[in-house]
Amino acid sequence: MNDPIELGRCLSFINSQLRPNEGEYPENKARWRAVTLSRETGTGGRLVAQQLAMYLQIQGGKNSSSWVIFDRNLLERVLEEHHLPARLAKFMPEDRISHIQDTLDELFGLHPPSWTLVEKISDTILRLAELGNVIILGRGANVITSKLDSVFHVRLVGSFEERTEFVQMDRKLDRKAAEELVSHDDEGRRRYVKKYFHRDIDDPALYHLAINTHALGHAAAAKLIMQAMFPTFESAHALSARRE
């Protein structure tokens, strides 16, 4: 579970979005109001999201609302919004519960049917995307929001070798443990999207853009997303920097 400070920031963001924002920039209001990041394990999705949020804030200007990242902290929001007990959080990650374990737990009534939990998660994701100024990682968010023209969808990929090395350094694991984690999490996310949304997570047609983060780097990947969303971003940013 994330700490209370992180949850507080998210709740504060949601409350601010429920009020009209006169300072919102016209480009965002006209088109892109949210971003979904689907990622292979070890591609640095959180790092890309953080850099992208910074760029989006620059694009919006000083008077625009902050962009907020929803990753693991999404679970707290789902539990709070749907009045669910905190103990259910361990059953909700997309990449942790095996298909067999999930089925057995449901069969013996150890937790609500997974379909019920996924429905609530999907409802929260859709609400957040409609509010805008959010970057949502994983959980089939790109499929859930596919009918919203204001959401930009990105897939982050990389070679198994490079992703394993990233996880090994990031999590401080030995080589074997890192390889197992990458394989396990990739399969879990693939299974989650297939089981609940009947889609192939690797289908390029589900995304506006696919990026190899190890070929470009995380900052460059975020910048590429920005340029795809707002073609004038780099020139406007450079002009602003010169003025300062």
Image (cartoon, rainbow, N blue to C red):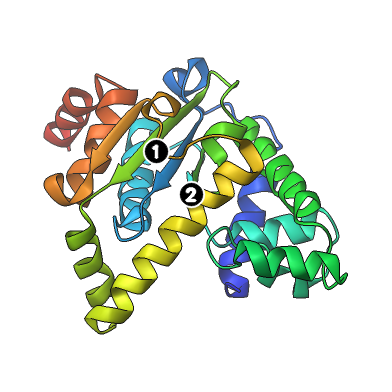
Crowd rating for badge 2 (residues with CA inside 10 Å; few <14, some 14–19, many 20+): many
Q: Position of residue 140 (x, y in %)?
A: 55, 42
Q: Residue at x 69, y 57 (%)?
A: 77
Q: Relative to 47, does residue 154 appear above or below in the rendering?
A: above
Is 150 situated left or right of 49 in this image? Answer: right
Q: Quadrant of the C terminus?
A: top left
Is 96 situated left or right of 186 in this image? Answer: right
As drawn, the label of residue 102 is none
Label 1: which secondary element = loop
The type of residue carrying mark 2 is Arg
What residue is shown with label 2?
A: 190
- Give the camera-side residue of 113 and 27: 113
Q: Residue furthest top?
A: 30
Query: In the rendered structure, which disc, 2 or 1, sits on the residue that comes first in sequence?
Result: 2
Q: Position of residue 55 (x, y in %)?
A: 31, 40
Label 2: which secondary element = helix
The type of residue carrying mark 1 is Asp
Q: Are marks 2 and 1 in contact (CB under 8 Å)?
A: yes
Q: Residue at x 19, y 69 (%)?
A: 165
Q: Position of residue 203 (x, y in %)?
A: 41, 31
Q: Quadrant of the N terminus?
A: bottom right
As drawn, the label of residue 202 is 1
